[in-house]
Amino acid sequence: MAAVIQKSPFNVANAILALSIGILVIVVAVPVSLIFINSFWVNGQFNVTDVVNILKQKETYEALLNSLFIAVGVTIMSTIVGTFFAWLVTRTDLPYKGLMKVMFLVPFMLPSFIGALAWKMLLSPRAGYINRRFARLLSVWLKNAHDGRFRVNGVCHKYIPHFHYDRLTPRHLTPLGSLSDVHLSIRI
């Protein structure tokens, strides 16, 4: 009879996983649950009237609708642009592919407030570099141009999985696999 070797349920990987989950619960779940619970307690007594009053306000639903609209728009645009760039980098002979790969990783390396400041400098309605150029060219102020600042991180989040999928999937298994490689080299 062959002896069955049983693995011990305690090993380093399980210990690291348990430690990570514990830290996540302490750092995220406990504060979020305390905020939720404390929103129902006023002066030591259970109170739902404040929450009901907030839910009765028209502005609450406008904010929720705006958030939903922005989330859907960003998801659609980021998926389209990220998929296009992932295809461009993985399936074409585009020059400077390595630089493009690195540039798509840069937003993950920078804190989000740096990106917000950069978008503010570029697309501020009155002082942004891009809007000042358009104002000179078109004599028009782009009032709501700052709404475009949310797209860069979304594009990068869509680029990364599509890039790895395109890179790892054999060409003959993709639809129109023989046509998926495009040569963009300009020959003079």
Image: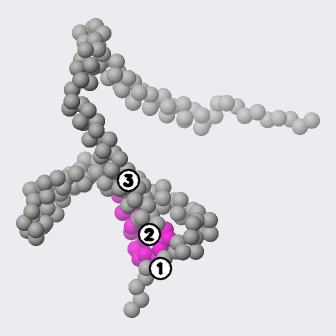
Can residue 37 be spotted in the picture?
yes
Please rate how many residues cluster around mark 2, counting C-alpha atoms within 10 Å: few if below 14, some from 14 to 19, many from 20: many
Chain part drawn in magenta:
89-108
Q: Nearer the viewer, residue 97 or 161?
A: 161
Mark 3 lies on a secondary structure that is helix
Type of the residue with mark 3 = Ile
Q: Are marks 3 and 2 in contact (CB under 8 Å)?
A: no
Left or right of residue 170: residue 166? left
Mark number displayed over residue 183: 1
**Above or below, comparing residue 111 to residue 136 in the picture:** above
Mark 1 lies on a secondary structure that is loop
Q: Are marks 1 and 3 in contact (CB under 8 Å)?
A: no
Q: Which residue is mark 3?
A: 76
Can residue 107 be spotted in the picture?
no
Q: Nearer the viewer, residue 85 or 5?
A: 85
Mark number displayed over residue 98: none
Quadrant (top left, top right, bottom left, bottom right) of the C terminus: bottom left
Q: Are marks 1 and 2 in contact (CB under 8 Å)?
A: no
Q: Earlier in the sequence, mark 1 or mark 3?
A: 3
x and y percentages locating residue 179 in the rendered image:
54, 75
As measured in the structure, the alpha-carbon distance from the residue carrying label 1 to the one carrying label 2 is: 10 Å
As measured in the structure, the alpha-carbon distance from the residue carrying label 1 to the one carrying label 3 is: 27 Å
Left or right of residue 30: residue 129? left
- Name the quadrant containing residue 103: bottom left
Q: Residue at x 23, y 20 (%)?
A: 53
Type of the residue with mark 2 = Leu
Q: Nearer the viewer, mark 3 or mark 2?
A: 3
Mark number displayed over residue 88: 2
Q: Nearer the viewer, residue 22 or 181?
A: 181
Q: Nearer the viewer, residue 162 or 104?
A: 162
